[in-house]
Amino acid sequence: MLEAMLSGWAKQQRGGRRLQPKTIRDREAVVRRFVLFAEEYPWRWSAGQVDEFMATLIGEEAKAESTIRSYQVALRQFCDYITSPYYRWATECEQRFGTHPVQVCHEWNTAAHLVDFEANASRRPMTRQEIQLLLDFADERVERAVRLGRKGALTAYRDATVFKVMYGWGLRCTETSKLDTVDFYRNPKAPELGRFGSLHVRYGKRTKGSAPRRRTVASVMPWAVEAVEDYVTNIRPRFESAGHPALWLTERGGRLRPREIESRFASYRDELGLPKELVPHCLRHSYITHLIEDGADPKFVQDQAGHRFASTTAIYTGVSTDFMNTMMRKALDRALGDEGEEMG
């Protein structure tokens, strides 16, 4: 019976919900592990057994918060499946075993899902000075290669533009790597930006095994638009593309990979003597932080970044001390002004 339940659940996830095979396998593994822990089959599970299981994962195995939540999600959704009247597992169990499965994961014994980002939040945004150092250094590498007549001038120009686009549109490495030339298009609200007014991100971060999430990012940094337009017009045609749709091409005509972006960033970072903690994803942190510092509406920033939860955007945001002091001064001046008016 257990094997039949798991087989049917896998088909439901794969067919109706379009989840990825690895996600399905991982969830099945959680169910099997809980069966061994509880020493009971699903039609005899109880909420108390879930409490004991979670206590073991936290107290003895020190599992991360995200891991605990993923286990709870797997158990809850499996129970949703086997208790659903549409699949008739409850009726079958009642006839065979004289009992039936129930939902054992509830609000009171599972963690609430508040954010969709639970990775290490210690990756800080780069300061504006660090951003400028990185981009200037990338441009200098282009000038040096051209001046010395080196073969790497095209790739150096490409890499400089890659970092400008990652910062200018707040992109992850994979999102950047998978951009095609057709992903930029006109925005009627910003005709001065030509065909680069908006960017269609087709390979955003997956959530719980689903397909890549898409989003549209409005162009808000004209200097970045100028950089990518120059690259598309004057540099990209010089690569041996053979009609390849990718925005970022290699010297062999293939698509630039995320690991290559990470490697080039690390090389520039180390040559500049910047902290080792900085990685390409910090450019995305910087984009979000600097938009907030510049007064952009938080909901706009959240949509630009493609976050479902405002709390995720807050994790990415690390405003500078100068910004905080400026906001404090404005708040104090406003408060003191209001008090003065009341006293008057």
Image (cartoon, rainbow, N blue to C red):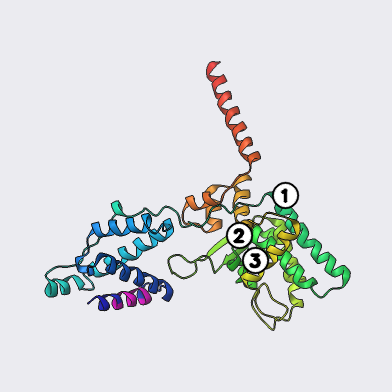
Mark 1, residues whose alpha carbon is within 10 Å: few (<14), some, or many (≥20)? few
Type of amino acid under label 1 = Gln
Which of 238 and 270 lies nearest the eye of the viewer?
Answer: 270
Mark 2, residues whose alpha carbon is within 10 Å: few (<14), some, or many (≥20)? some
- In the picture as drawn, the residue positioned furthest to the bottom comes out as 242
Asked whether residue 332 is in view, the answer is yes
Which residue in the structure is indicated by mark 2? 281
Residue 129 circle label: 1
- Secondary structure under badge 3? helix
**Residue 147 position by quadrant:** bottom right
| Callout 2–callout 3 Cβ contact below 8 Å | no
Which residue in the structure is indicated by mark 3? 262
Q: Residue 46 location in percent, x, y? A: 22, 60
Horizontal relation, residue 219 to residue 158: left or right: left
Q: Residue 84 location in percent, x, y? A: 23, 68
**Residue 15 position by quadrant:** bottom left
Q: Quadrant of the C terminus?
A: top right
- Secondary structure under badge 2? helix
Q: Can residue 336 be found in the magenta stretch?
A: no
Find the distance from the CA under tag 2 to the CA under tag 3.
9 Å
The region drawn magenta spans 7-15
